[in-house]
Every structure is written in structure tokens, then in C-alpha cells.
Amino acid sequence: MKIGFIGLGNMGGPMAANLAKAGHEVSGFDVAGVEIDGVTSVETGPAAAEGADVVITMLPNGSILRAVADTVIPAMKPGAVLLDCSTVDVDSARTVAQQAKAANLGALDAPVSGGIGGAAGGTLTFMVGGSDEAFAIAKPLFDIMGQKSVHCGEAGNGQAAKICNNMILGVTMIATCEAFALADKLGLSREAMFDVVSTSSGYSWSMNAYCPAPGVGPTSPADNGYLPGFAAELMLKDLRLSQQAAEAADADTPMGEEATALYARFVEDEDGLGQDFSAMLPRFEKRGRG
Ligand code: NAD
């Protein structure tokens, strides 16, 4: 396929490289002028989009996506698919999809989980919103860039799935970390705490697969000085998107709201910026109730 790729950062760069490696003809554009192995660099977004069967965007946020879509959609050939893999607000995803549809294009929102390691290794999971036709066109590309793609329904549903998942993740990570810090103060060893909880009803991905306590459970960012992994500021971004969506849909999400406030404090007023999101554990460790 002929592919345009816009946004060649930490995630987009390796994703574009994997598509090129698999034999697709990839034209890439990034405002930062990035060069990627096997990808032809072009000077503008519309130049990357011209003649492409699929145009992939991997951008920082919804307002940048909207601005890029405004310039790229008119340059795309009828029947082509605009495939946004960024994590953005549901409203931006649905607006861009409508705009693409009006121009006789297919549109998919397909945010990912799996992080930079998943992007490099081609093992991402895609959560996809949009039509069956557009999904069928993009499926072979998902299979190269990832190991799983779940079609979640209409436009915007990929973003909805992503922020609901990450709201659960933020809340359970905080719960796991505060419980470890309480267990410390009650004199329980971390190993005992892990052995019990990971096989009891308090288990979760945060405890079992990404344990925030160093030296306990499987290897995780806690064993690497809390270097990300999944940075606290990216968790904060996703939690804020969940609260923006909850506000728009009139959904009551008290735990999501609390998790958003706590990650905001951690990232903006404390030392959370640049640390893994599981560094909530040393944060709780240092604190008392006051
Ligand atoms: P990044 O900042 O490394 O990359 C974004 C790229 O977009 C940058 O290279 C930037 O120069 C480029 N860009 C910005 N404005 C542009 C424009 N108008 N035209 C062309 N290029 C432009 O970010 P990232 O880590 O690659 O994340 C990309 C998206 O993936 C985000 O939405 C993020 O939330 C999501 N995501 C990231 C991770 C992760 O672990 N990094 C995991 C899952 C999802």
C-alpha cells in the first residue's frame, strides 16, 4: 500500500519504520524534520497524503489532530482511509471522522496501548472506532504494527475504550500503591503483600504484571528507578481525557476524578514529571495522613 505517515515521534517513528520494513511505500512528515529508516521524508502533511491509500496520524493531542486533518483531508484521494492512532478526546475523533466522511474518505480512530516498546516491536494493541469497510482496509496494517486490533464500533469508540481502560488503570495503580504503603506501616513485608494480593481478590494488572514495589513480582519500572515505562504525565493526559468525556456525557466518575487530581498534583506540584506512573508508591511511602 501507499501510506502517508504524519507525526514521527517516539511512537509514530517506529510504527512507520515497521510498515516500510514490511514492504509498504511510506511517505512521512513531522514538523520536527525527523528522518526514519525506509521512510521517504516529505515537506508537508498534504504531500505525505497525496495518492496514499491510508494516511496515518500519530500526534500529541486533539487540537493538533484537527489542524492536521484540515490540511490533509483535501489532499487525500477519494476512498482512502484517514487512520488516527493518537490518543485524543472523543469529540475531536468524531469531528475529524465526520469531516473525512463528507470528503468521501474512510476514517478510523485507533489509539494504542503497548507504549514505545510495543511500537518498536510491532506488538501494539489497537482499539478501533469506525466503519467495517475502513477497518478491513486498515487491518493488514494493524497486523504489522501490532499483535491485536479490536473493532469497538462507530467513530470515537476506539478513544472511548482507551480512556475507560486507562481510567481503571490509574485508579488501580493508586489503590495498589497506597495499599503497599499502608502494609509497610503495618509491618507486612512487600513479598508477603505481593504473594497474598496477587493471588487474592485485590489482584490486578497493576499488582500482578507491573508491580510498583521494587524487587517484588515481575520486572517492572520500579526495578529501574521508576524510569518510564508509562510516564506519569501520559497517565495524567489520559485521565484528563476521561474526565472531559465524563463531563460531556454526564457520567459520574468519582474515582476517575480523584485519580486525575492526584496525578495532577504528582506531576505538576511534586516530583512526578518524567517518572513512571507507578512512582506513586515512593510518593505514598514518604507521606503520612496530614
Ligand atoms: P511524541 O511527542 O514523541 O510524538 C509526536 C510527534 O508529532 C512529534 O515528533 C511532533 O514533532 C509531531 N508533530 C506535532 N505537531 C505536528 C504537526 N502539526 N504535523 C506533523 N507532526 C507534528 O509523542 P508520542 O509518544 O509518539 O505519542 C504520540 C501519541 O501516542 C500521543 O497521542 C500519545 O498520547 C499516544 N501514546 C503514547 C504512548 C507512549 O508510551 N509514548 C503510549 C500510548 C499512546
Image: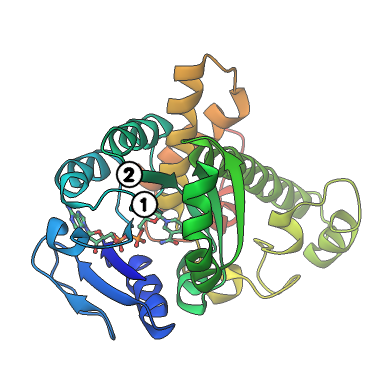
Give the x, y percent position of residue 138. Answer: 47, 59
On the picture, is 195 further left or further right than 51?
A: right
> What whole-number distance in Å separates the C-alpha atoms at marks 2 and 1?
6 Å
Q: Is residue 131 above or below residue 34?
A: above
- Callout 2: CB less than 8 Å from ligand 1: no
Q: Which mark is residue 247?
A: none
Give the x, y percent position of residue 171. Answer: 63, 40
Q: Quadrant of residue 165?
A: top right
On the picture, is 190 further left or further right than 133?
A: right
Which is nearer the eye, 285 or 219? 219
How many residues crowd mark 2 within 10 Å: few (<14), some (14–19), many (20+)? many
Which is nearer the eye, 170 or 244? 244
- Do labels 2 and 1 touch, CB within 8 Å? yes
On the picture, is 88 further left or further right than 256?
A: left
Q: Is residue 102 above or below residue 83?
A: above
Give the x, y percent position of residue 152. Answer: 60, 42
Q: How many marks?
A: 2
Q: Is residue 269 above or below residue 149?
A: above
Identify the amino acid type marked 1.
Val
Q: Which mark is residue 81?
A: 1
